[in-house]
């Protein structure tokens, strides 16, 4: 179970996330005021975000010393309702938020509503269909991302090969991938196996007992050393 708990306080409410990683293990952390505002009970985002997005946002929020997004170039794949984009922007990143054309209206609305006049950099929301014109849209000479963020992009859909190719193209020498996924069926497991052929993969969270979710950090296998992944943080 992953839940958001609205706690009363003398001056203002506090939002916290509870991550249940076992029958007797509960991890609770207070979220910052900026993230709590996005996820307040009145927010439309609260009813439609995926648990994978919540797990990734929780990680970004609570690991800012090691994974400092301030002034970093970040791209999110499959942004959906935009929660990860919004949180990354509030944490100081220069974010490019991408998804399919049919969700652009809702994505732009959510991102604009929750980041306007609150972020150092205005997020860029743009269409991206995995495997289609990625090189033309994001030429490597001018687009170098420090982080690729992804939540709930791997499931039994027919575009897993295109997603793999998109990861492969966008991930350059010093790029890190932070990726939260839910394990459902064999396609997810086989994707991870194929992913390991191209990328080093480090497990950051294992919440399979309660949520069937894992959070990974990945970087290209053709890096000169594993430590370069840490140095980019």
Image (cartoon, helix red, strand yellow):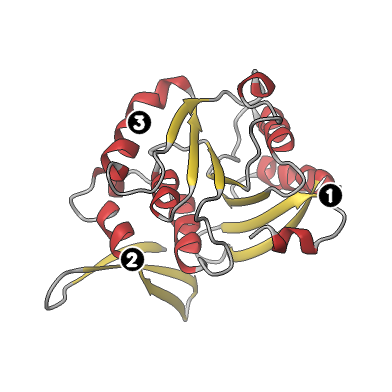
Image quadrant in which you'd find residue 85? top left
Q: Residue 228: x percent and y percent?
A: 77, 59
For residue 221, the mark is 1
User: Number of callouts in the render?
Assistant: 3
Q: What residue sits 57% from the left and 62% below the top? A: 67
**In this orientation, which residue lies closer to the viewer: 176 or 68?**
68
Q: Are discs 3 and 1 less than 8 Å apart at CB?
A: no
For residue 146, the mark is none
Image quadrant in which you'd find residue 214? bottom right
Label whose residue precedes the other's in the sequence (1 or 2): 2
Q: Residue 208: x percent and y percent?
A: 58, 62
Q: Are discs 3 and 2 less than 8 Å apart at CB?
A: no
Q: Mark 2 points at which residue?
A: 32
Q: What residue sits 63% from the left and 42% below the top? A: 145
Quadrant where the C terminus sits is bottom right
**In this orientation, which residue lies closer to the viewer: 224 or 79?**
224
The relative height of residue 61 versus residue 103 in the rendered view (above or below) is: below
The relative height of residue 185 versus residue 163 in the rendered view (above or below) is: below
Q: Are discs 1 and 2 less than 8 Å apart at CB?
A: no
Q: What residue sits 81% from the left and 61% below the top? A: 226
Label whose residue precedes the other's in the sequence (3 or 1): 3
Separation of residues labelled 1 and 2 (CA atoms): 35 Å
Kind of element beneath mark 3: helix
Q: Name the residue under label 3.
A: 108
**In this orientation, which residue lies closer to the viewer: 172 or 187?**
172
Q: Residue 207: x percent and y percent?
A: 55, 64
């Amino acid at each position: 179970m992953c839940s958001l708990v609205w706690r009363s306080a003398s001056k203002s409410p506090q939002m916290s996330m509870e991550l249940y990683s076992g029958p007797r293990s509960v991890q609770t952390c207070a979220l910052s005021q900026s993230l709590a505002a996005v996820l307040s009970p009145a927010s439309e985002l609260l009813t439609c975000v995926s648990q994978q997005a919540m797990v990734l946002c929780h990680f970004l929020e609570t690991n800012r010393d090691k994974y400092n997004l301030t002034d970093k170039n970040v791209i999110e794949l499959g942004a959906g309702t935009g929660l990860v984009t919004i949180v990354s922007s509030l944490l100081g990143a220069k974010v490019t938020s991408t998804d399919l054309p049919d969700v652009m209206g809702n994505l732009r609305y959510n991102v604009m509503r929750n980041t306007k006049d609150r972020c150092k950099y205005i997020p860029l929301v743009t269409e991206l269909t995995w495997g289609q014109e990625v090189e033309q849209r994001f030429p490597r000479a001018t687009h170098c991302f420090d982080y690729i963020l992804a939540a709930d992009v791997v499931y039994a859909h027919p575009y897993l090969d295109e997603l793999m190719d998109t990861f492969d193209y966008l991930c350059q020498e010093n790029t890190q991938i932070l990726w939260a996924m839910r394990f459902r069926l064999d396609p997810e497991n086989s994707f991870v196996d194929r992913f390991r052929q191209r990328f080093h993969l480090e497990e950051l969270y294992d919440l399979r007992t309660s949520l069937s979710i894992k959070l990974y950090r990945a970087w290209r296998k053709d890096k000169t050393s594993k430590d370069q992944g840490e140095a980019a943080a």
